[in-house]
Amino acid sequence: MPDDMSPLRKGAKQGSFVDNYLLYLLASVSHHASGQFHAYVRSKGVRVPEWRVLATLHDEDGAMITTLARISLLEQSHLTKIVDQMQRAGLVKRRPDPKDARRVRVFLTEKGRELATELVTDARAHEASLMDRLSEEEAAAIKPVLKSLLARLEP
């Protein structure tokens, strides 16, 4: 691919705005890369928002709904309904925060932990296959650059 990232869309003109627009590039990469993995997640009987909750709890079991909503990129009210469904499916359970009983924390059940561990392992393999498509320099740079931008964008 040329250095100028020239036309990514079929029929696009050299140097077109869209094909060089950061937000289009980010969204397009996310759409294609996550679409592959999300299809796999759905084949396991898990919806994408549930996968995000499982992955978050895999890292931080006992997270509060506000934290889950932020990391899962979902509205808190929508996430509450998803957690309700996951609880009915036996994947998570709610418990009061021991330091403040008004707060509720969400934990993985044994069934949820097994599923989360399986999916996180598969996600790591999928990520590795994506990173293998990049040069060593690109692979080494991509996450730090994205993390730096994210840190500057988050409130």
Image (cartoon, rainbow, N blue to C red):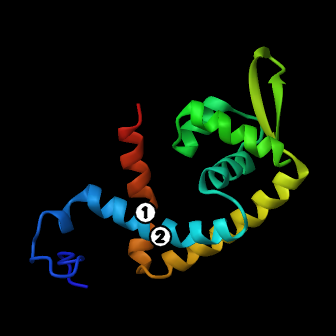
Q: In the rendered structure, which amino acid carries the disc numbered 1?
A: Ser
Q: Left or right: 134 with respect to 100?
A: left
Q: Residues within 10 Å of mark 2 (few under 14, many from 20)?
A: some
Classify mark 1: residues with Cα within 10 Å, few (<14), some (14-19) or many (20+): few
| Front-most of residues 33 and 141 | 33
* Circle 2: residue type: Ala
Q: Residue at x 18, y 64 (%)?
A: 18
Q: Is residue 110 left or right of residue 2?
A: right
Against 67, residue 3 (above or below) is below
Q: CA distance from mark 2 to mark 1?
A: 5 Å
- Residue at 79% x, 60% y is 115
Q: Residue at x 65, y 66 (%)?
A: 42
Against 106, residue 20 (above or below) is below
Read off the residue under disc 1. 30
Looking at the image, can residue 141 be seen? Answer: no
- The location of residue 139, given as percent across then percent down, is 45, 72
Q: How many marks?
A: 2
Q: Residue 1's image quarter?
A: bottom left
The circle on residue 33 is 2
State the image quarter where residue 2 is shown.
bottom left
User: Which one is nearer the viewer's eye here, 148 or 14?
Assistant: 14
Which element carries disc 2, helix, strand or loop?
Answer: helix
Residue contact at pointers 2 and 1, CB within 8 angstroms: yes
Q: Residue 127's x, y, as percent?
A: 56, 71
Of the pair 12 and 127, the residue shown nearer to us: 12
